[in-house]
Image (spheres, helix red, strand yellow):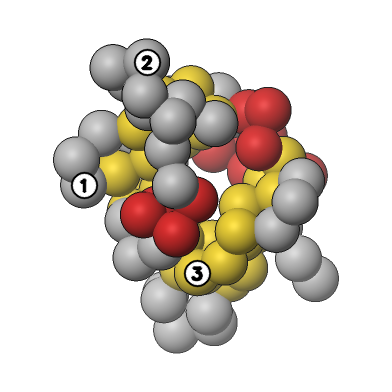
Amino acid sequence: MRDNYGGVLKPENLIKKEAKGIDNTDLGEVKEITSNSIITEKHNGDKDKFIIPKNLVERFHEDDVLFQITEKDSDTYKEE
């Protein structure tokens, strides 16, 4: 993965960043990075967990990770 400046991004630098969809959907906080996915957890009383493929990352910012998904799409990646 590369950061917004063309440098190589260390996956561990994404841990604890806020995860959002392109429509500002709250996808929680990044908890884990696997070889293919980024796992987030949303603390909304139920602790919703999302497993989102890395190829859906739109961009990284100082405090958050933006994914190419909408609120409607997020159910697809929600762990039951």
**For residue 74, which quarter of the picture?**
top right
Q: CA distance from mark 3 to mark 1?
A: 14 Å
Disc nearest the viewer among 1 and 2 = 2
Residue 78 in picture, x, y percent from top left: 71, 58
Residue at (25, 34) in percent of width and height: 61
User: Is residue 57 among what the camera can see?
Assistant: yes
Mark before the other along the chain sequence, 3 or 1: 3
Give the amino acid at mark 2: Gly
Pointer 3 local density, CA inside 10 Å: few below 14, some 14–19, many at least 20 = some
Q: Residues within 10 Å of mark 2 (few under 14, many from 20)?
A: few
Residue at the spot of label 3: 31
* Kind of residue at badge 3: Lys
Q: Which structural element holds mark 2? A: loop
Alpha-carbon span between mark 3 and mark 2: 24 Å
Q: Secondary structure at mark 1?
A: loop
Which of these two is toward me, 28 or 12? 12
Residue 29, image x, y percentages: 40, 63
In the displayed structure, 61 sits above or below 40; it is above
- For image coordinates 54% across by 38% down, the residue present is 71
Would you say residue 75 is visible in this rendering?
no
Residue with the most extreme bottom position = 45
Q: Is residue 48 left or right of residue 45?
A: right
